[in-house]
Structures are given as structure tokens and as C-alpha cells.
Image (cartoon, rainbow, N blue to C red):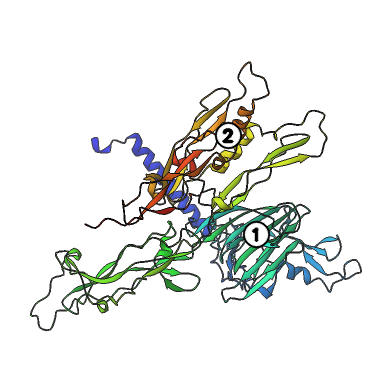
Amino acid sequence: MECCRWTTAGTLLLASLILSSRTARSEEDRDSLWDAWGSWSECSRTCGGGASYSLRRCLSSKTCEGRNIQYRTCSNVDCPPEAGDFRAQQCSAHNDVKYQGQLYEWLPVSNDPDNPCSLKCQARGTALVVELAPKVLDGTRCYTESLDMCISGLCQIVGCDHQLGSAAKEDNCGVCNGDGSTCRLVRGQYKSQLSASKLDDTVVAIPYGSRQVRLMLKGPDHLYLETKTLQGVKNENSLSTTGSFLVENSSIDFQKFPDKEILRISGPLTADFTIKIHYAGAAESSVQFIFYQPIIHRWRETDFFPCSASCGGGYQLTSAECFDLRSNRVVADQYCHYYPENIKPKPKLQECNLDPCPASDGYKQIMPYDLYHPLPRWESTPWTACSSSCGGGIQSRSVSCVEEDIQGHISPVEEWKCMYTPKMPVVQPCNIFDCPKWLAQEWSPCTVTCGQGLRYRVVLCIDHRGMHTGGCSPKTKPHIKEECVVPTPCYKPKEKLPVEAKLPWYKQAQELEEGTAVSEEPSFIPEAWSACSVTCGVGSQVRLVKCQVLLSFSQSVADLPMDECEGPKPVSQRACYGGPCSGEAAEHTPGEIQLLYGSLQELDELYDWEYEGFTECSESCGGGVQEAVVTCLNKQTREIADETLCVSSRRPPQLLKACSLDPCPPR
């Protein structure tokens, strides 16, 4: 019969069900041999994370499968700073017990890779290390930088959720099982610039709550710390010796070597830290730093606003406000907009006051949200341009209370109607970051091995993020080339001119110096130079210069009109030298030497502004004015050049002179 015929699949399914049933029954039989678990023991510690256990009894005359003890963590609250290290307490308990007939002051030996759960201690002032107990107390950390704890002499894994056996881990921001969105990575480099008037300088300011701070100084100078608590208390630490110590309750690990210093802070920092450098030698030092900075301004959802109707059914909305996690107060929205990671939550809607109105004999139907008469709201004009491109400025806007009718028409109303929400600020600070500044790299070796030569260095314009950018003042730019003298006597005729650097080194210096990274401010971005127009002798190179801006949200680059970019436009043409032509002597003619020497100079040494006569008089009689004509000239050829070649030189002031001073004849 069809109903009684088994398929192969049906047979496998039945077998699977029988096996599953037997497995479940065997587990029940196994557990039935045990008594119920007992109550949990007292925690092994009162703070800092301890262990508690529970026991059960085997009810069978035979051996029961499984364990008769289970553990869990407890007292997972931080200990006060004065409590000290738990392992150190266990070592110090042996201070009044003689070891080999002598008393010692015992200090903990942590992070033993072979047996982290034994109590090994070192006698202060000696190299004597002794295992004073085979097991540390339950709840002792296996390693100083881990939550894993010792239980019954074995290291047990503990997750950031403080559960035994858990694989949960903190992200770089210190959030358990987090996605890293509550902080940002900050890395950079500082290079000392020696000055007779400065004894120290600021390397980097690291704000409260930052984590995984790492700094390395290379050179003869010395690091030190300045701290400022949230209460405004300031302190200084000289970092004079190698060791681990507490600064404002933050654990500091400092290592001092003859040629470098290393500073590590796990964090989170409990104060604002300013890392400074004290100049100690004639040589320059560099500091590399990296840390995770918390995002201290985050959106916070508000409570529901008052209902739009007192009866008969209305609606109410929530909003979002920018909250400063440090000061625990609401701040202007732009502080949250500064972080692209912050996404403003959308408003929530709910119905309210649904009871019928007293004057109504029926029930008011709740209309869809988009047909409601919206609440009055604050509306603002766009922010004005910042008063300063860097170093701190202000921008303003106008804010007014408006109301929108059901047809979508917007009209201004009295401000009190919008007072259910805070009025938006009308002034805010902007561009509070430091202005770009010149950073000179190390000098190259001298171009000669004896006598007089030249040396070069790369000069970069560095912004507040440590990125190579534009915007530095050409007036304050350090020179990239200078003469040098090697005190070894030469046994050949002296060169007429200092020997120029080989082209690859100079090309590297010049390209690094002139290269500009696209930023969120409109800036001139030059493309690569074309090949030299000649293969030998003196020729020219050209390149394209664009006005571009980085769109922060899409991380894309957009081209802008040239007048959108401020500051001097980089040159688009320069001289180049392709080496001696075949058959030519190694010596150059005076003219070629002048061209070659000039091609490697700054462009403003080749081109400059000059006055070339005056315009016609503005009046034929009765007094007028004439304006001096300014042109860009090639200093060598005296030919008029494109004005873009003179952008690095200051344009001369406008000159006017009186003309046609004779009185006009009467009409």
C-alpha cells in the first residue's frame, strides 16, 4: 500500500529522531546522578574582580560524569587607588616571615609566561626571586594588562563582560563588544626646531579619556608632562627616571635611554595631558605619537515636546541635542557635526491627549502625521564665512521663529512660540585649529668633498594635523639651499660657482617642498611637472595647477574656479637642465652657467614686478591722475612674462601722479 511505503529519507529522519532522543535521555540520566547546585560562596575579593564557587554532590555509588564545582566572577567594580595591587598585597603578607633566616620586603613578579598563577616575589634591593606560594588567591589577575584571572591555580579566560570563558573584548575606545565608533585614531610627528629664545615646546595635547597613548622621542631632548584635571587643577611631571608611576590616577610607563625616550599610557586618561619637550642639545629631535581620542560630543535624544493639542488627539515629537560628555551639559549642534561618525537620530512621533474635547459630542479622528499643522520651529540662515582661515575666528547667522501652515507656506511668528526648544546660537567659533607652519627637514650632505659647495633641505608646510599642505606665508619660509664648506683642502682649481646638487636629490627636495595635499579648504593643487622640453642643455617644464577642495562627507575631490582659492598660485613653468649635449665640453659658457644656476633657484629670483611707464591722464584739463603700469619681467631676458610667474613676489604698491593741471577753458 502507498501509505505504508518508507522512503530512504524517511528512514534517515526516524533514525535521527531516535538518536536525538537517546542523547537527551543520557544527558538527563547523567544529570540525575547529581544533587542540585548549592548556593554561591562569598566572593574572594571585595573589589577589582574576584571569584565565587558553587558545589554539588554525586548521588550515585558510582562515579558521576562532570564537575562538582562551578565558578563565576563577582565584585566587578574598580578598587580605590589606595587599595594597591592584589598580587603585591599577597607578597607583602610574607614580609614578617623569615626566609632562610632573614626578613625581606617582597615585591610582586608579574606576567610570568610559564606559571602566571604562582606567587613569585622579589626581595627589594636584590636579585632574589622566590615562589612563596604555589597558587595565588582566586581572583588575582593572570597578567597586568588582562582581565583573565587565576582560579584554583589555573588561568581562566575572562571577557570584557566579566564572564568566565567569554570571548568578548573591548574595542580601541574601551567599549565592550564595541565597533570603535566612539573614538578616533590620532597619529602624527613632531620635529624640534631649535631656537635661542625657546627652552621648550608643546609636542601634542591629549584630551581626557584618551587611550593607548604611545610616544617615542629620538634625539638628545627630554619629554615632560603637564596635566589639567576637569576641576582645573594643574600639575607637572618631569619624567626624570625610568619606571612605572601614577599621574592623576593614570598609570604611566616611561623608559629613558641615552638616545631615545618611550612613553606609554594605557588609559583612559583621567585628566588632560600636554606632552612637552625640553631642549637639551644642539641636535634636533623628533617625536612620533599615536593615541585613540574619545568623541566627547554625542547626540542625545530629548524627551517628547508638549502635545500639539490639549484634547481631541494630537501629536508630540522628540528631538536630538548635542551633549558634552565631559561637562555633562548641552552644547551647540556644530560640536556634534564636527565628527562624521555622529549621526543625528531622527525625531520620534507619538499620539497624545486622545480624550474628546469637552465641547465636542464625538471623537476626533487622529490624522496622519504629515497632515498635522506642524509646531513652530527655529529656522536659521547659513553661517557666514569664518573671519579667519585658521588660528580661531567667528561666524554668525540670524535665527528666527517660523510657522508652516498646512499648505506648506512659511511665515515668521513671535519668538515665544518656539521657546519649547532652546534657541539656536547665532555666533560660534570656527577654524580653531593652529595655522600651518613651515617645518624644515635635515640638511643634505655638502655637494663637494672639499672646499666650498652647497647643501639642501626639504621645507614643508605642515597643518595642525601634521599633514603636508599649503597656506604658509612665503615671507617666513626658511631657505632650502645654502653654501657649505668642507674643511678638507682641494688639490684642484677652485670652482667658479658652488657645485649644484645632483638632479635627483634636488628634484626630491623641490617636489616635496612644492607638493600640496587636497584639504577641506579650497587650495591650489599643482600636478606633476612635464618632461623637460630638451634632452640636453637648458629647456623648460610646464604643469597644470588646479583649484580643488576635499568634500569631507563623500571623501571626493572637486574642481573649483581659480578665484575660489586664496593665496599665491604655484608657478606653472620653470627652467630645466638636461645635461651637457653630446660633443660639448664639461665646462659651460658663462651664459649657460647663469641659466643653469638660475634654473635651480627660487622662481622669484627669475621673475619680478617692475614699473613700465604710466597710463594716459584721466582728464584732459582741470587736474587728473595717471596710474603706474606694473608688469612681470624676466630678469635675465628683460621680456614681459605671464603674471602667474610673479605670484611668489609681492606686487608693488599702486602709484598715482597728478596730470593735466591747467584749468579747463570756460564753456
Q: Residues within 10 Å of mark 1 (few under 14, many from 20)?
A: few
Q: Is residue 3 left or right of residue 449?
A: left
The location of residue 447, given as percent across then percent down, is 71, 35
Please name whichever residue, 610 or 403, is drawn nearer the observer in this view of the structure: 610
The percent position of residue 392, horizontal first and vertical second, equals 48, 64
The label on residue 636 is none
Give the camera-side residue of 375 and 616. Answer: 616
Query: What residue lies at 37% left-to-right and 42% top-to-bottom?
Result: 14
At 35% from the left and 52% from the top, the residue drawn is 660
Q: Residues within 10 Å of mark 2 (few under 14, many from 20)?
A: some
Circle 1 residue: 145
- Amino acid at dot 1: Glu
> Where, by quadrant of the figure, is residue 249 drawn?
bottom right
Q: Which residue is mark 2?
A: 599
In the rendered structure, the answer to whether residue 177 lies left or right of residue 117 reads left
Q: Amino acid at mark 2?
A: Ser
Q: CA distance from mark 2 to mark 1?
A: 59 Å
Q: Secondary structure at mark 2?
A: helix
Q: Earlier in the sequence, mark 2 or mark 1?
A: 1
Say if residue 664 shows up in the picture.
Answer: yes
Quadrant including the N terminus: top left
Q: Position of residue 501 (x, y in %)?
A: 66, 34
Front position among marks 2 and 1: 2
Question: Is residue 58 shown to the viewer in this render?
Answer: no
Q: Say which quarter of the image contains residue 379.
A: bottom left
Q: Quadrant of the C terminus?
A: bottom left
Check the image and report above or below for 154 versus 231.
above
